[in-house]
Amino acid sequence: MRISELADLSGVSVPTIKYYLREGLLPPGEKVAERLADYDERHVRRLRLLRALREVGGIGVGALRGLVDAVADRSAPVHEMFGAACDALAQAAGRRTDPAKSLDLADRLIERAGWTGVCPDASERKHLEELLEVIGSFSGPVDPDSLERYLKWADAIAEFELGTFSDPQQDRDTLMEQMVVGQVVYGELLLSLRRLAQQHHSSRRFG
Amino acid sequence: MRISELADLSGVSVPTIKYYLREGLLPPGEKVAERLADYDERHVRRLRLLRALREVGGIGVGALRGLVDAVADRSAPVHEMFGAACDALAQAAGRRTDPAKSLDLADRLIERAGWTGVCPDASERKHLEELLEVIGSFSGPVDPDSLERYLKWADAIAEFELGTFSDPQQDRDTLMEQMVVGQVVYGELLLSLRRLAQQHHSSRRFG
Protein backbone atom coordinates (compact mmCIF):
# COMPACT_ATOMS: atom_id res chain seq x y z
CA MET A 1 0.00 0.00 0.00
CA ARG A 2 0.96 3.66 -0.41
CA ILE A 3 2.00 5.85 2.52
CA SER A 4 -1.37 7.65 2.42
CA GLU A 5 -3.25 4.37 2.90
CA LEU A 6 -0.84 3.44 5.67
CA ALA A 7 -1.72 6.74 7.37
CA ASP A 8 -5.46 6.04 7.04
CA LEU A 9 -5.22 2.51 8.39
CA SER A 10 -2.91 3.30 11.31
CA GLY A 11 -4.33 6.68 12.32
CA VAL A 12 -0.82 8.18 12.19
CA SER A 13 -0.29 11.22 9.93
CA VAL A 14 1.97 11.07 6.85
CA PRO A 15 4.51 13.59 8.27
CA THR A 16 4.77 11.53 11.48
CA ILE A 17 5.23 8.32 9.47
CA LYS A 18 8.04 10.00 7.52
CA TYR A 19 9.62 11.10 10.78
CA TYR A 20 9.46 7.54 12.18
CA LEU A 21 11.03 6.22 8.96
CA ARG A 22 13.91 8.72 9.24
CA GLU A 23 14.40 7.86 12.91
CA GLY A 24 14.45 4.14 12.19
CA LEU A 25 11.39 3.46 14.35
CA LEU A 26 9.56 2.08 11.32
CA PRO A 27 11.35 -0.22 8.86
CA PRO A 28 11.44 1.11 5.27
CA GLY A 29 8.85 -0.10 2.77
CA GLU A 30 9.75 -2.08 -0.30
CA LYS A 31 11.00 0.27 -3.00
CA VAL A 32 8.83 0.00 -6.12
CA ALA A 33 9.96 3.15 -7.95
CA GLU A 34 12.38 6.02 -7.45
CA ARG A 35 10.17 7.88 -4.96
CA LEU A 36 7.58 5.24 -4.20
CA ALA A 37 7.62 2.55 -1.52
CA ASP A 38 5.16 -0.21 -0.78
CA TYR A 39 4.03 -0.86 2.81
CA ASP A 40 2.27 -3.86 4.31
CA GLU A 41 0.37 -5.12 7.34
CA ARG A 42 3.56 -5.21 9.45
CA HIS A 43 3.94 -1.46 9.02
CA VAL A 44 0.35 -0.90 10.10
CA ARG A 45 0.92 -2.96 13.23
CA ARG A 46 4.15 -1.20 14.14
CA LEU A 47 2.53 2.22 13.72
CA ARG A 48 -0.44 1.21 15.82
CA LEU A 49 1.98 0.14 18.53
CA LEU A 50 4.01 3.37 18.37
CA ARG A 51 0.80 5.36 18.52
CA ALA A 52 -0.48 3.51 21.61
CA LEU A 53 2.85 3.97 23.37
CA ARG A 54 2.88 7.67 22.63
CA GLU A 55 -0.78 8.39 23.37
CA VAL A 56 -1.40 6.04 26.27
CA GLY A 57 2.04 5.84 27.79
CA GLY A 58 3.24 9.35 26.94
CA ILE A 59 6.46 7.73 25.75
CA GLY A 60 8.85 9.94 23.78
CA VAL A 61 10.90 9.12 20.68
CA GLY A 62 14.08 8.36 22.67
CA ALA A 63 12.40 5.61 24.68
CA LEU A 64 10.57 4.34 21.61
CA ARG A 65 13.93 3.85 19.94
CA GLY A 66 15.15 1.88 22.96
CA LEU A 67 12.15 -0.42 22.61
CA VAL A 68 12.63 -0.91 18.89
CA ASP A 69 16.35 -1.63 19.38
CA ALA A 70 15.47 -4.16 22.06
CA VAL A 71 13.36 -6.17 19.68
CA ALA A 72 15.62 -5.71 16.64
CA ASP A 73 18.43 -7.89 17.99
CA ARG A 74 16.97 -11.24 17.01
CA SER A 75 19.85 -13.22 18.46
CA ALA A 76 19.13 -12.05 22.02
CA PRO A 77 17.15 -14.44 24.23
CA VAL A 78 13.55 -13.44 24.90
CA HIS A 79 14.30 -12.63 28.52
CA GLU A 80 16.95 -10.10 27.46
CA MET A 81 14.58 -8.52 25.01
CA PHE A 82 12.08 -8.19 27.83
CA GLY A 83 14.69 -6.67 30.14
CA ALA A 84 15.74 -4.17 27.47
CA ALA A 85 12.11 -3.18 26.91
CA CYS A 86 11.64 -2.69 30.68
CA ASP A 87 14.76 -0.57 30.76
CA ALA A 88 13.59 1.69 27.97
CA LEU A 89 10.27 2.18 29.77
CA ALA A 90 11.89 2.83 33.15
CA GLN A 91 14.09 5.49 31.59
CA ALA A 92 11.00 7.08 30.07
CA ALA A 93 9.32 7.13 33.49
CA GLY A 94 12.35 8.21 35.53
CA ARG A 95 13.83 11.57 36.17
CA ARG A 96 17.45 12.28 35.36
CA THR A 97 19.36 11.41 38.47
CA ASP A 98 22.82 11.00 39.82
CA PRO A 99 24.10 7.74 38.29
CA ALA A 100 26.15 7.02 41.42
CA LYS A 101 23.09 7.31 43.62
CA SER A 102 22.60 4.75 46.37
CA LEU A 103 19.90 2.20 45.69
CA ASP A 104 19.67 0.90 49.23
CA LEU A 105 15.95 1.04 49.72
CA ALA A 106 15.07 -0.21 46.24
CA ASP A 107 17.50 -3.12 46.53
CA ARG A 108 16.13 -4.06 49.94
CA LEU A 109 12.57 -4.06 48.64
CA ILE A 110 13.47 -6.18 45.60
CA GLU A 111 15.31 -8.64 47.82
CA ARG A 112 12.40 -8.80 50.21
CA ALA A 113 10.06 -9.55 47.30
CA GLY A 114 12.35 -12.38 46.20
CA TRP A 115 12.69 -11.02 42.64
CA THR A 116 16.06 -12.61 41.92
CA GLY A 117 15.48 -12.34 38.17
CA VAL A 118 15.84 -8.53 38.12
CA CYS A 119 19.11 -7.43 36.45
CA PRO A 120 21.58 -5.81 38.88
CA ASP A 121 21.83 -2.77 36.58
CA ALA A 122 18.14 -2.47 35.64
CA SER A 123 17.09 1.19 35.25
CA GLU A 124 13.90 0.37 37.10
CA ARG A 125 15.86 0.04 40.36
CA LYS A 126 16.81 3.69 40.10
CA HIS A 127 13.28 4.73 39.24
CA LEU A 128 11.96 2.81 42.27
CA GLU A 129 14.50 4.49 44.55
CA GLU A 130 13.36 7.90 43.25
CA LEU A 131 9.73 7.10 44.00
CA LEU A 132 10.61 5.92 47.51
CA GLU A 133 12.42 9.21 48.07
CA VAL A 134 9.40 11.21 46.97
CA ILE A 135 7.19 9.19 49.33
CA GLY A 136 9.74 9.76 52.10
CA SER A 137 9.65 13.52 51.50
CA PHE A 138 5.97 13.54 52.46
CA SER A 139 5.70 10.99 55.21
CA GLY A 140 9.24 10.43 56.47
CA PRO A 141 11.60 7.55 55.63
CA VAL A 142 9.76 4.63 54.03
CA ASP A 143 9.31 1.54 56.16
CA PRO A 144 9.62 -1.52 53.87
CA ASP A 145 7.02 -3.34 56.01
CA SER A 146 4.39 -0.82 54.98
CA LEU A 147 4.90 -1.77 51.33
CA GLU A 148 4.54 -5.52 51.83
CA ARG A 149 1.07 -5.57 50.26
CA TYR A 150 2.23 -3.66 47.20
CA LEU A 151 4.98 -6.22 46.68
CA LYS A 152 2.44 -9.04 46.85
CA TRP A 153 0.03 -7.35 44.44
CA ALA A 154 2.78 -6.52 41.96
CA ASP A 155 4.03 -10.09 42.13
CA ALA A 156 0.58 -11.61 41.61
CA ILE A 157 -0.21 -9.29 38.70
CA ALA A 158 3.13 -9.88 36.95
CA GLU A 159 2.97 -13.64 37.41
CA PHE A 160 -0.52 -13.72 35.89
CA GLU A 161 0.49 -11.45 33.03
CA LEU A 162 3.60 -13.39 32.09
CA GLY A 163 1.45 -16.49 31.99
CA THR A 164 -0.69 -14.94 29.27
CA PHE A 165 2.22 -14.39 26.87
CA SER A 166 2.19 -16.73 23.96
CA ASP A 167 4.85 -19.27 23.14
CA PRO A 168 8.31 -17.60 23.05
CA GLN A 169 9.03 -19.51 19.83
CA GLN A 170 6.63 -17.34 17.93
CA ASP A 171 7.65 -14.28 15.98
CA ARG A 172 9.42 -11.45 17.75
CA ASP A 173 7.11 -8.72 16.57
CA THR A 174 4.07 -10.41 18.08
CA LEU A 175 5.91 -11.05 21.33
CA MET A 176 7.13 -7.47 21.53
CA GLU A 177 3.62 -6.21 20.82
CA GLN A 178 2.24 -8.35 23.64
CA MET A 179 4.95 -7.24 26.03
CA VAL A 180 4.69 -3.57 25.30
CA VAL A 181 0.90 -3.42 25.20
CA GLY A 182 0.90 -5.49 28.37
CA GLN A 183 3.34 -3.20 30.12
CA VAL A 184 2.05 0.16 29.02
CA VAL A 185 -1.63 -0.21 28.21
CA TYR A 186 -2.55 -2.74 30.88
CA GLY A 187 -0.49 -0.67 33.32
CA GLU A 188 -2.66 2.35 32.56
CA LEU A 189 -5.75 0.15 32.74
CA LEU A 190 -4.77 -0.97 36.23
CA LEU A 191 -4.36 2.64 37.36
CA SER A 192 -7.66 3.66 35.77
CA LEU A 193 -9.54 0.83 37.50
CA ARG A 194 -7.81 1.68 40.77
CA ARG A 195 -8.95 5.32 40.51
CA LEU A 196 -12.52 4.17 39.90
CA ALA A 197 -12.37 1.75 42.82
CA GLN A 198 -10.96 4.55 44.99
CA GLN A 199 -13.94 6.74 44.08
CA HIS A 200 -16.26 3.92 45.08
CA HIS A 201 -14.53 3.23 48.39
CA SER A 202 -14.23 6.95 49.10
CA SER A 203 -18.00 7.24 48.69
CA ARG A 204 -18.49 4.33 51.11
CA ARG A 205 -16.05 5.69 53.64
CA PHE A 206 -16.75 9.43 53.46
CA GLY A 207 -20.03 9.71 51.49
CA MET B 1 10.58 33.17 55.06
CA ARG B 2 11.63 34.90 51.84
CA ILE B 3 10.89 33.48 48.40
CA SER B 4 14.54 32.43 47.99
CA GLU B 5 14.39 30.32 51.15
CA LEU B 6 11.10 28.85 49.99
CA ALA B 7 12.83 27.84 46.75
CA ASP B 8 15.69 26.20 48.65
CA LEU B 9 13.42 24.27 50.98
CA SER B 10 10.97 23.08 48.34
CA GLY B 11 13.41 22.42 45.49
CA VAL B 12 11.24 24.55 43.17
CA SER B 13 12.95 27.49 41.42
CA VAL B 14 11.99 31.11 42.13
CA PRO B 15 10.63 31.73 38.59
CA THR B 16 8.44 28.61 38.88
CA ILE B 17 7.20 29.72 42.31
CA LYS B 18 6.27 33.11 40.82
CA TYR B 19 4.46 31.35 38.00
CA TYR B 20 2.47 29.20 40.46
CA LEU B 21 1.58 32.34 42.45
CA ARG B 22 0.30 34.07 39.30
CA GLU B 23 -1.68 30.97 38.30
CA GLY B 24 -3.24 30.66 41.75
CA LEU B 25 -1.72 27.23 42.38
CA LEU B 26 0.10 28.59 45.42
CA PRO B 27 -1.69 30.93 47.85
CA PRO B 28 -0.01 34.34 48.24
CA GLY B 29 2.34 34.94 51.15
CA GLU B 30 1.66 37.46 53.85
CA LYS B 31 2.58 40.94 52.63
CA VAL B 32 5.21 42.48 54.90
CA ALA B 33 6.31 45.37 52.65
CA GLU B 34 5.51 46.80 49.24
CA ARG B 35 7.40 44.14 47.31
CA LEU B 36 8.08 41.62 50.04
CA ALA B 37 5.96 38.67 51.16
CA ASP B 38 6.48 36.19 53.94
CA TYR B 39 5.96 32.47 53.30
CA ASP B 40 5.54 29.62 55.75
CA GLU B 41 5.56 25.83 56.11
CA ARG B 42 2.22 25.52 54.28
CA HIS B 43 3.80 27.03 51.18
CA VAL B 44 6.69 24.56 51.37
CA ARG B 45 4.25 21.66 51.59
CA ARG B 46 2.12 22.85 48.70
CA LEU B 47 5.19 23.32 46.49
CA ARG B 48 6.51 19.89 47.39
CA LEU B 49 3.16 18.46 46.36
CA LEU B 50 3.05 20.36 43.06
CA ARG B 51 6.59 19.24 42.32
CA ALA B 52 5.80 15.57 42.96
CA LEU B 53 2.72 15.74 40.77
CA ARG B 54 4.66 17.33 37.96
CA GLU B 55 7.78 15.19 38.17
CA VAL B 56 6.28 11.84 39.11
CA GLY B 57 2.87 12.08 37.54
CA GLY B 58 3.79 14.26 34.55
CA ILE B 59 0.75 16.37 35.43
CA GLY B 60 0.44 19.72 33.66
CA VAL B 61 -0.65 23.09 35.03
CA GLY B 62 -4.27 22.68 33.81
CA ALA B 63 -4.81 19.51 35.81
CA LEU B 64 -2.92 20.93 38.78
CA ARG B 65 -5.41 23.78 38.84
CA GLY B 66 -8.27 21.28 38.82
CA LEU B 67 -6.77 19.62 41.88
CA VAL B 68 -6.23 22.86 43.72
CA ASP B 69 -9.80 23.99 42.95
CA ALA B 70 -11.08 20.65 44.21
CA VAL B 71 -9.54 21.19 47.61
CA ALA B 72 -10.23 24.93 47.79
CA ASP B 73 -13.99 24.52 48.16
CA ARG B 74 -14.03 23.81 51.87
CA SER B 75 -17.79 23.44 52.04
CA ALA B 76 -17.79 20.36 49.76
CA PRO B 77 -17.96 16.98 51.47
CA VAL B 78 -14.72 14.98 51.48
CA HIS B 79 -16.11 12.47 49.01
CA GLU B 80 -16.79 15.24 46.48
CA MET B 81 -13.32 16.62 46.94
CA PHE B 82 -11.98 13.15 46.23
CA GLY B 83 -14.15 12.80 43.14
CA ALA B 84 -13.02 16.19 41.85
CA ALA B 85 -9.37 15.23 42.39
CA CYS B 86 -9.95 11.94 40.51
CA ASP B 87 -11.57 13.86 37.69
CA ALA B 88 -8.66 16.26 37.35
CA LEU B 89 -6.26 13.32 37.20
CA ALA B 90 -8.37 11.38 34.70
CA GLN B 91 -8.45 14.40 32.42
CA ALA B 92 -4.68 14.65 32.68
CA ALA B 93 -4.34 10.98 31.72
CA GLY B 94 -6.97 10.95 28.99
CA ARG B 95 -6.84 11.94 25.38
CA ARG B 96 -9.22 14.50 23.97
CA THR B 97 -12.20 12.55 22.78
CA ASP B 98 -15.68 12.91 21.46
CA PRO B 99 -17.77 13.99 24.48
CA ALA B 100 -20.79 12.11 23.10
CA LYS B 101 -18.83 8.90 22.89
CA SER B 102 -20.48 5.68 24.04
CA LEU B 103 -19.23 4.35 27.35
CA ASP B 104 -20.77 0.91 27.00
CA LEU B 105 -17.78 -1.19 27.85
CA ALA B 106 -16.53 1.02 30.66
CA ASP B 107 -20.00 1.16 32.23
CA ARG B 108 -20.38 -2.60 32.01
CA LEU B 109 -17.03 -3.17 33.69
CA ILE B 110 -17.79 -0.71 36.49
CA GLU B 111 -21.15 -2.36 37.04
CA ARG B 112 -19.58 -5.78 37.07
CA ALA B 113 -17.07 -4.61 39.67
CA GLY B 114 -19.93 -3.32 41.83
CA TRP B 115 -18.47 0.19 42.09
CA THR B 116 -21.77 1.95 42.69
CA GLY B 117 -19.99 4.94 44.26
CA VAL B 118 -18.50 6.13 40.96
CA CYS B 119 -20.17 9.34 39.70
CA PRO B 120 -22.20 8.84 36.51
CA ASP B 121 -20.27 11.67 34.84
CA ALA B 122 -16.79 10.84 36.14
CA SER B 123 -14.09 11.61 33.56
CA GLU B 124 -12.42 8.36 34.45
CA ARG B 125 -15.22 6.43 32.71
CA LYS B 126 -14.21 8.03 29.43
CA HIS B 127 -10.55 7.35 30.03
CA LEU B 128 -11.31 3.70 30.78
CA GLU B 129 -13.33 3.38 27.58
CA GLU B 130 -10.39 4.81 25.60
CA LEU B 131 -8.01 2.28 27.11
CA LEU B 132 -10.39 -0.58 26.33
CA GLU B 133 -10.53 0.62 22.73
CA VAL B 134 -6.76 0.67 22.46
CA ILE B 135 -6.60 -2.87 23.84
CA GLY B 136 -9.31 -3.89 21.38
CA SER B 137 -7.32 -2.47 18.47
CA PHE B 138 -4.57 -4.98 19.20
CA SER B 139 -6.40 -8.08 20.27
CA GLY B 140 -10.00 -7.66 19.11
CA PRO B 141 -13.01 -6.57 21.18
CA VAL B 142 -12.34 -6.82 24.90
CA ASP B 143 -14.07 -9.63 26.76
CA PRO B 144 -15.05 -8.34 30.23
CA ASP B 145 -14.41 -11.83 31.66
CA SER B 146 -10.74 -11.52 30.80
CA LEU B 147 -10.46 -8.43 33.01
CA GLU B 148 -12.06 -9.99 36.08
CA ARG B 149 -8.72 -10.30 37.87
CA TYR B 150 -7.83 -6.67 37.21
CA LEU B 151 -11.13 -5.59 38.74
CA LYS B 152 -10.39 -7.65 41.85
CA TRP B 153 -6.86 -6.30 42.21
CA ALA B 154 -7.96 -2.70 41.70
CA ASP B 155 -10.72 -3.18 44.26
CA ALA B 156 -8.41 -4.73 46.86
CA ILE B 157 -5.76 -2.05 46.38
CA ALA B 158 -8.25 0.84 46.58
CA GLU B 159 -10.01 -0.58 49.63
CA PHE B 160 -6.70 -0.95 51.43
CA GLU B 161 -5.57 2.54 50.42
CA LEU B 162 -8.75 4.27 51.49
CA GLY B 163 -8.39 2.56 54.85
CA THR B 164 -5.02 4.26 55.36
CA PHE B 165 -6.41 7.79 55.01
CA SER B 166 -6.58 9.65 58.23
CA ASP B 167 -9.69 10.94 59.90
CA PRO B 168 -11.76 13.05 57.46
CA GLN B 169 -12.24 15.60 60.24
CA GLN B 170 -8.64 16.68 59.96
CA ASP B 171 -7.45 19.58 57.88
CA ARG B 172 -8.16 19.62 54.17
CA ASP B 173 -4.60 20.26 53.10
CA THR B 174 -3.36 17.12 54.82
CA LEU B 175 -6.19 15.06 53.40
CA MET B 176 -5.59 16.38 49.90
CA GLU B 177 -1.88 15.67 50.25
CA GLN B 178 -2.61 12.09 51.28
CA MET B 179 -5.10 11.60 48.45
CA VAL B 180 -2.94 13.05 45.76
CA VAL B 181 0.29 11.41 46.85
CA GLY B 182 -1.66 8.19 47.25
CA GLN B 183 -3.16 8.43 43.79
CA VAL B 184 -0.19 9.62 41.82
CA VAL B 185 2.94 8.50 43.64
CA TYR B 186 1.67 5.15 44.93
CA GLY B 187 0.18 4.56 41.47
CA GLU B 188 3.63 4.98 39.93
CA LEU B 189 5.08 2.83 42.69
CA LEU B 190 2.66 0.05 41.84
CA LEU B 191 3.66 0.21 38.16
CA SER B 192 7.35 0.27 39.01
CA LEU B 193 7.05 -2.79 41.27
CA ARG B 194 4.99 -4.54 38.60
CA ARG B 195 7.71 -3.92 35.99
CA LEU B 196 10.31 -5.36 38.35
CA ALA B 197 8.14 -8.37 39.10
CA GLN B 198 7.60 -8.85 35.35
CA GLN B 199 11.37 -8.91 34.83
CA HIS B 200 11.66 -11.55 37.52
CA HIS B 201 8.86 -13.72 36.15
CA SER B 202 10.14 -13.24 32.59
CA SER B 203 13.50 -14.58 33.70
CA ARG B 204 11.80 -17.59 35.28
CA ARG B 205 9.63 -18.26 32.28
CA PHE B 206 12.01 -17.47 29.40
CA GLY B 207 15.46 -17.25 31.04
Image (cartoon, coloured by chain):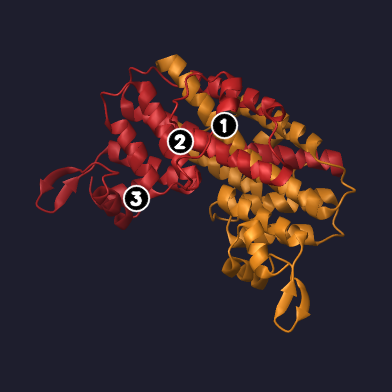
Chain colours: A red, B orange
Q: Chain of mark 1?
A: A
**Are discs 1 and 3 less than 8 Å apart at CB?**
no
Percent coordinates x, y for residue B54 in the rendering = 58, 54
- Check the image and report above or below for A109 versus A189: above
The answer for how far apart the CA atoms under marks 3 and 2 are is: 36 Å
Q: Find numbered disc 1 in the image and state the secondary structure of the residue it sits on.
A: helix
User: Which residue lies under the disc numbered 2?
Assistant: A123
Is residue A8 or residue B23 the one in the foreground?
A: B23
Q: Is residue A87 left or right of residue B92?
A: left
Going by the numbered disc 1, the residue's amino acid type is Asp
Percent coordinates x, y for residue A12 in the rendering = 36, 51
> Which one is earlier in the sequence, the residue at label 2 or at label 1?
1
User: Which residue lies under the disc numbered 3?
Assistant: A8
Q: Is residue A27 left or right of residue A156?
A: left
Percent coordinates x, y for residue B167 in the rendering = 87, 43
The answer for how far apart the CA atoms under marks 1 and 3 are is: 49 Å
